[in-house]
Amino acid sequence: MNETYMMTSREVENLGKGVRLVHLYPQSLLIKKVLEGIRTYIILGVMLIIICLIAAVVISLKSTGFLNEFIHAMESVRNRNYDIRIKEYKNAEINSLGRAFNEMMDELRELIRNKYESQILLNEMEIRFLQHQMNPHFLFNVLLTIQIKAKRSGNETIYKMVSKLSALLRASIYTNNVDRITVGEELEYTEFYLYLQKMRFEGRFFYKIIVEDEELKKSIIPKFVIEPIVENAVIHGIENIENEGVIRIVLKKMGTDLLVTVQDNGAGFDVKEYFNSLEQAENGSSREKIGLKNVDLRLRHIYGEEYRIKIKSKINTGTTIYIKRPIEEREENV
């Protein structure tokens, strides 16, 4: 019938020798069936390829999504938005990059905060200095005149008071650009102030300065670190008591650090309430004991958080303040 067949045959033993079973397959029908089977596999293959492409696109989008977010975060940092953060990802490698970026932003914000605090403190100190500044030449000429007259009249007490006041003012005015001085110079300025206060209290106030090792006087210290602490002890401690006031200053070496102790038997104060008053001072509602905070901030900014002042105080008993800083032996190391 004009048809091509494919044939298979096999012997059928149980029907007798020489009997064969012959199968004839129309070639056209066979090809049709094969093509129908291949079509199914082709459809499955195409579907598998589509699924793989979709998965690849999703994975690619996830990866490029992180890159886009990272680029956006960097643009935000360039625009000084330091609060930007990268969200967490399920992928461990990508998440570690995001975490590293967030930690970097935290450190950057801390550095900026410290810089702003330092600048604010510096501006505040400059403003306070300008507010209290007089014409230094006129001031020293007047003091010199008083000093000469006191010397000629034989009044040694007034002569010494004016002399020490002049020296203290010269230290604050003419060394304005000096950041560090020797411990010996700082103690000298402190003693100028204490002597003037002793004369003011007329025998009701005494002080003692103890340096365990004279070599400590040669080390370097930030200017006006001890004197403001002593001034605070006099104004807020000794002035508020009726009995005899005593201030004791001790300097000693503690390992590689210099420990300065300023102790008074004054009125004392509540330390917790003091820190609350510091917060009010930052908000502009109080200016009491701000000298302590300034010294504390300077020490932390110069030497680190470990080197901050420590305060022990008890009302009607007295106050002890500890100042610790690394020993800097030579000025060229500063």
Image: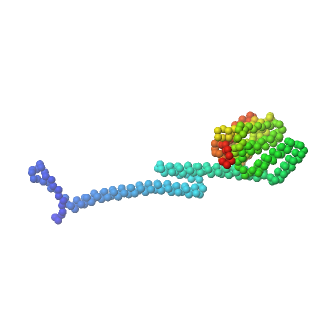
User: Residue 51 at x, y = what percent?
Assistant: 38, 55
Q: Give the residue at the far left of this rendering.
A: 17
Indicate the quadrant where residue 193 lies.
Answer: top right
Indicate the quadrant where residue 265 lies.
Answer: top right
Residue 251 higher or lower than 57, as above or below? above
The residue under the point 77% across, 51% down is: 173
Observer-nearest residue: 11 or 154?
A: 154
The residue under the point 11% across, 48% down is: 14
Observer-nearest residue: 111 or 267?
A: 111
User: Residue 155 at x, y = what percent?
Assistant: 88, 42
The residue under the point 83% across, 43% down is: 160
Task: Assign the N terminus to one quadrant of the image.
Answer: bottom left
User: Residue 81 at x, y = what percent?
Assistant: 59, 55
User: Residue 326 at x, y = what percent?
Assistant: 66, 43
Indicate the quadrant where residue 192 lies.
Answer: top right
How many marks can you see?
A: 0
Determine if residue 177 is in view. yes
Residue 112 higher or lower than 234, as above or below? below
Q: How is the image coloured?
A: rainbow
Observer-nearest residue: 17 or 148?
A: 148
Q: Give the residue at the far bottom of this rendering.
A: 2
The residue under the point 47% across, 50% down is: 93
Observer-nearest residue: 218 or 108?
A: 218
Determine if residue 291 is in view. no
Q: Is residue 108 left or right of residue 228?
A: left
